[in-house]
Image: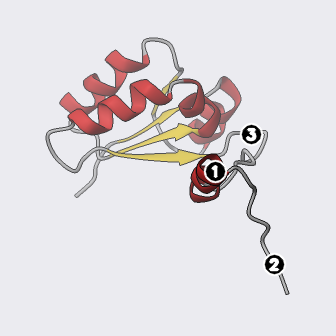
Amino acid sequence: MVEKIAIIGDDITNTGFKLGGIGYTFGEENLQERLYELEKDNFGIIFITERIEERNRTIVEDFKRSKRGVLPLIIEIPDYMGPIEREDRISMLIKRAIGVDIIKNEG
């Protein structure tokens, strides 16, 4: 059973989660050390805002690869500014490989 949930986000996002009852909120400073501390302290879920994850993608990916087990789950969430518009990773790989963009037909 997951007992501890942490948020890694900006001040506004963290304040919203604190108001919602989440007691463990952190900024992005010392992110690498923070992730390993949360794993050691048996956190089950770590929510991280998309913008922080994007700025620290290497740190987050390295942590995911080095985890001993399934937990903690790292879940990206939008921050107070809303979701980041991102290009689909598969479309990006195809575009890089063949040099053209794939147009989605919606109809």
Q: Is residue 105 above or below residue 91?
A: below
Residue 39 picture location, percent across and down: 24, 33
Pointer 1 or 3: first along the chain: 3
Asked if disc 1 and disc 3 are in contact, CB closer than 8 Å, the reply is no
The amino acid on which the numbered mark 2 sits, given as a three-letter code, is Asn
Pointer 2 or 3: first along the chain: 3
The image quadrant where one finds the C terminus is bottom right
| Residue identifier under label 2 | 105
Residue extending furthest toward the front: 98
Q: Is residue 23 above or below residue 96?
A: above
Quadrant position of residue 91:
bottom right
Q: Nearer the viewer, residue 106 or 98?
A: 98
Residue 55 picture location, percent across and down: 59, 24
Q: Is residue 19 above or below residue 62?
A: below
Closer to us: mark 2 or mark 3?
Answer: 2
| Residue located 32% across and 29% down the image | 62
